[in-house]
Image: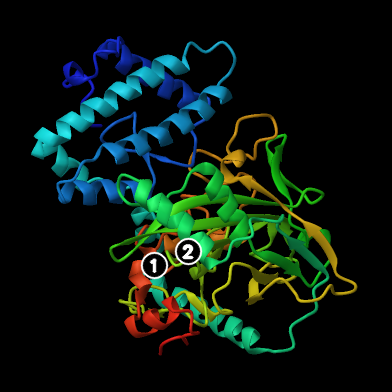
Amino acid sequence: MLTVTTALWGMAPAAASVQPTSCEVSRAHFDADVHKQGQRDPRYHATAFSPWLRSDRFLLDALQRTLAAGHEPAPILQAMAGKDRQAVNRELSALAPGHPHHERTLDACREAEVAAWTSALAQDAGLRTEIAAASIPDAYRGWQRALGGYLFARPLLRQGAQNWRLEEHRLQRDTSTPDARLRWQPPPGPKWDRSGVAGQLAEAMAAHPLGWPWPDDAVRDQLAQHFAPIIESPSDASADRIGRLYGYQGHPRVDTQAPTAYVETNLVRLGDEVLLQISYAFWFPERTATGPLDPYAGPIDGLIWRVTVDPSGLPLLWDSIHTCGCYYTLVLPQDAPIVFHNPDPAAQEDPLVLIGPVATSRVRLMASAGDHFLRWPRAGPPDVVEQGVETQTYRLRPYAELLAPGPRRPPFRSNGLLSGTSRLERLFLFPAGIPDPGAMRANGHHATAFLGRRHFDDPELASGMISRAPSALARWKEGSGATLPE
């Protein structure tokens, strides 16, 4: 692991009184204790160039772009340090009582490391080259694909994915949608129209040192309320009710008496644009078996709905996966100023592409009974109160709450997998190279294709499949009701 802590310590701020050797020793001991006790935080990834900086795929990509353009990297290094601080604080709280580690010591070391890296990157082309070659760990195993005969399994994997898409398209065309038995709606949010959202994003971009649409925490919470979906189910069975995910004696459980959506905000790229994304994770107690050996059934199931927000204040696109990473679905607004394309269909699995309602802040989603497939996205809320539909309000909670230490913490492992959720499908999907396919996993660990490679948190996921359509874009910006380009 490359580290500049010792070599560059003289460049650290004078206020940092911690000696370089003590910082390295403190961090090495801390990381060793975290590893020994199995408390490694799964959300963010350690960088290969510093133990004091953790990243997601967007931040590493942004750092590489910033250095390539010769711009100031300090804001991104600070953001990476912030990710490490969040993870370290969770890890500290999860360690057994009596550990010798102190938050203030680790914070001082981290602050000095950021200052040292900021200075070094301005002077050392070798370090910039090292970072340009860095990457976030892949969610696919090359050895597993080789051992499982991936090249020979590709036709079967392709056919399986195609069969699923064809069946889903057939169901989506069925106008006789089942009646909802259950409905969960978000709490009331701000009374914004599209111009109100656009104003918040414009203010954030003006204030951010890199011009990113990243509002403060309070505004992001309000935006999460504004774009939160309505979830419906045609079944009132306990397995089809959303709830709070928690751990009990090392096993995951879902409390359906506390319907909850776990929210996370991130950034994504579309060409040269940086856009805000808001994701909502919903958890179910189980995926119901359809027979004695259903390979997809098992305890705990989940659905993630994600909104990519255009600077004009409307959703640019929606997408979704199950919390295992499977069933990647792209939902395009009817009036979207975008077109879909797969640049390499021979090597890359197509997502399921659906045409949703016109761009709107509130969407109604039907989660099918038993398997919780996303069906019939429509504009919401319903115009009338429907008799016989049990309606509840779900809570919006930060996704980080799932990672917070405590006796009721869901048992996510350091590799992001949720213990106790393995499926039999892992046996015949082994050639795809995904660890334990079908098991639930934490954000940041979702492989979304069995053919090729695709990650749900790839900052250029949208850029690889979506492009702006200029003529439609002009009409859409004017609010005149553009139609989806062919």
Q: Is residue 361 visible?
A: yes
**Quick check: 8 above or below 341?**
above
Task: Find disc 1 in the rendering and name its residue.
Answer: 462
Q: Nearer the viewer, residue 451 or 129?
A: 129
Q: Residue at the location (14% across, 46% down)?
A: 70
Quadrant position of the N terminus in the picture: top left
Quadrant in which the C terminus is drawn: bottom left
Report the side of 468 relative to 95 (left or right): left
Left or right of residue 355, residue 24 in this image: left
Q: Amino acid at mark 2?
A: Thr
Q: In the rendered structure, which disc, 2 or 1, sits on the residue that comes first in sequence?
A: 2
Residue 181 found in image quarter: bottom right
Q: Residue at x 51, y 60 (%)?
A: 197
Q: Which residue is mark 2?
A: 308
Task: In the rendered view, tell whether residue 204 sits above or below residue 77.
Answer: below
Seen from this angle, which residue lies furthest right?
388
Give the colouring mode of the picture.
Answer: rainbow
**Toward the viewer: 143 or 102?**
102
Disc 2 from disc 1: Cα separation: 9 Å
Q: Position of residue 446 (x, y in %)?
A: 48, 55
Question: Which residue appears at 34% of the width and 69% of the height?
Answer: 464
Q: Residues within 10 Å of mark 2 (few under 14, many from 20)?
A: many
Q: Nearer the viewer, mark 2 or mark 1?
A: 2
Q: Secondary structure at mark 1?
A: helix
